[in-house]
Image: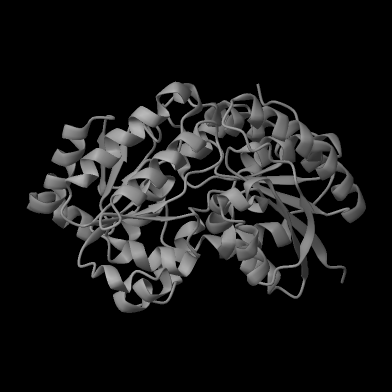
Amino acid sequence: MKKRKIIAISGARSDYDLLYSVYNKLNNDPNIDFKIVITGPNLSDNYGYTAKNIENDEFEIAGRIFNLVDSSQKIGRIISIGLQIPSLANLLLQENPDIVLVAGDREEAISGTMTCAYMDIPVAHFFGGDIAKDGNIDNAVRYASGKFAHIHFPTLEEHRKTLLKLGEDDWRIFVVGNPALDRILSTPELSDKEVFTRLNVMEKNISNYCVLIQHPIITQYDLQEKHIKITLDALKEFDGHCFINFPNSDAGSNRIISAYQKYANDFPKKFTLFQNLERKTYINLLRSAEFLIGNSSSGIVEVASIGLPAINVGERQRGRIHGENVIFVDNDGQQIKMAIHKIRTDSDFQEKVKKKYNPYGEGNSADKVVKVLKELEINDKLIYKNITY
């Protein structure tokens, strides 16, 4: 029996972490020939060269596409997409995969789905149909990627309904939950001492801490420095330590990184900055944190499953379905401090968080995805799409 050849496109730390459980199961299946294309910020030293995570996990690499225009200007992102498409098209022409996998709402999602659609290669898109009411370009990218895609793996029934409203065939859509939960729930536990040793911070004698991940919003480009300083100034008054992870590569990230570096340098007893945290270390750091703060999707999608409160700052992630662990605040120092106070003193809120209810699934998504990818018939009906209305 001929192996089914599947190639995934990974552009950043985030999508790789989200889909690792799927990749791992595909890689270990004797009937699947699985490879990964590495591109985008994954290959940038300025963002921690997160490609090393993929390499260290010993997945077969189909190719490396160096397309990132590392610029804080808005134009950098669209030039990056333009550079990515021809290299990706040539690589897929050589590899001739049966199915390609892409995730989410970043450059490789739109370039990957569009390239595959033009080349008649079935492409599966993860996390389509999600709705965030933050006005960010990611929303349009997510919807457009869904229109190019042939197979959909949304996380929730509500997202399936959105895809149906976009005119997608119901038989193309498979609600699977979020594969990120498979990994976060299965990651072995480390002691705080082991985590701090990995992070090389034992000398700081940290007793309690939070984790900060705040990404730029392209529509608020000129406000990024102001907004992150509001968050950092509020956290200066927090009586614990703050571990900071680098933002993504969107326009405005350089301003956020500069602020991080200044605060970490000026207040080393308060802030510790990392370019990128290895996943096992990151998950265990979250497990013992008092709260996650910023605007990362981890707060919305993942950390409810480990009973961690999340403070979502600003417009990013607004409108998305979330667990009862999330507190939404504006870019306002007083609101941030009030949210921290609520986490520490509101017994009703604490009890809700402890229940670890997560609307995005229970940690069995990868099995559902792999079953579909192995059994789905590849034919003209799958490849040639029509709108349903």
Using the image, determine if residue 57 lies above or below residue 226: below
Q: Position of residue 40 (x, y in %)?
A: 67, 45
Which residue is farthest right?
94
Tell whether 341 sits left or right of 330.
left
Give the position of the C terminus as an image quadrant.
top right
Q: Residue at x 90, y 47 (%)?
A: 93
Q: Position of residue 175 (x, y in %)?
A: 53, 49
Tell whether 338 sits left or right of 176.
left
Q: Residue at x 39, y 71 (%)?
A: 200
Q: Position of residue 330 (x, y in %)?
A: 27, 29
Q: Is residue 359 visible?
A: no
| Colouring of the image | one colour
Q: Is residue 198 visible?
A: yes
Using the image, determine if residue 129 lies above or below residue 345: above
Which residue is farthest front?
266
Q: Residue at x 37, y 73 (%)?
A: 195
Q: Nearer the viewer, residue 22 or 274?
A: 274
Q: Position of residue 312 (x, y in %)?
A: 31, 40
Tell whether 218 sits left or right of 332.
right
Give the position of the N terminus as an image quadrant.
bottom right
Quarter of the image for residue 184 reads bottom left
Tally the numbered discs: 0
